Image (spheres, rainbow, N blue to C red):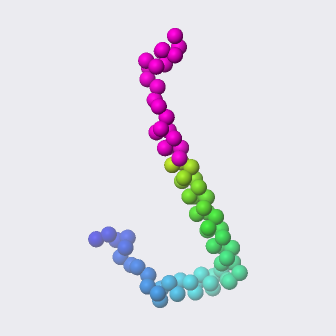
Amino acid sequence: MNTLFLWTPGVGEIVLIALVVLLLFGGKKIPELMRGLGSGVREFNSAKNSIKNEIEEGMKEPKNTEKEKTAVEK
């Protein structure tokens, strides 16, 4: 059995967590926190897509063999 999914939060737990977050950060800070979280996720996805595109472009480039290199040099 996978120990990662032993506990799944129900509605009551989610409400409790939301109340604790509201008490800790206050109503005015939550939109700012969510904005920061959103921009972080956006930057992560941008970097992930950039790396993926670089890998795909690297796979598309033809590989030069030693014979082609020597033929070009002559």
Quarter of the figure with residue 39: bottom right
Q: Is residue 63 left or right of residue 38?
A: left
Q: Position of residue 28 (x, y in %)?
A: 71, 81
Give yes or no for residue 17 being in the magenta stretch: no
Q: Is residue 10 left or right of residue 6?
A: right
Q: Nearer the viewer, residue 72 or 48?
A: 72
Tell me: residue 43, above or below residue 10. above
Tell me: residue 12, above or below residue 66. below
Q: Nearer the viewer, residue 34 or 57?
A: 57
Task: Identify the residue at horizontal 46%, vertical 29% (top origin).
Answer: 63
**Which segment did they paint magenta?**
53-74
Tell me: residue 35, above or below residue 24. above
Tell me: residue 45, above or below residue 55. below
Q: Residue furthest top?
A: 74
Task: Identify the residue at horizontal 49%, vertical 44% (top origin).
Answer: 56
Task: Identify the residue at horizontal 53%, vertical 43% (top origin).
Answer: 54
Give yes or no for residue 69 being in the magenta stretch: yes
The quadrant in which the N terminus is found is bottom left
Quarter of the figure with residue 22: bottom right
Q: Is residue 6 left or right of residue 59?
A: left
Q: How many numbered markers are drawn? A: 0
Q: Position of residue 29 (x, y in %)?
A: 69, 78
Q: Position of residue 41 (x, y in %)?
A: 58, 63
Q: Residue furthest bottom?
A: 12
Q: What main secondary structure does the magenta stretch of the protein show?
A: helix
Quarter of the figure with residue 8: bottom left
Q: Position of residue 37 (x, y in %)?
A: 61, 68
Q: Residue furthest right?
A: 28
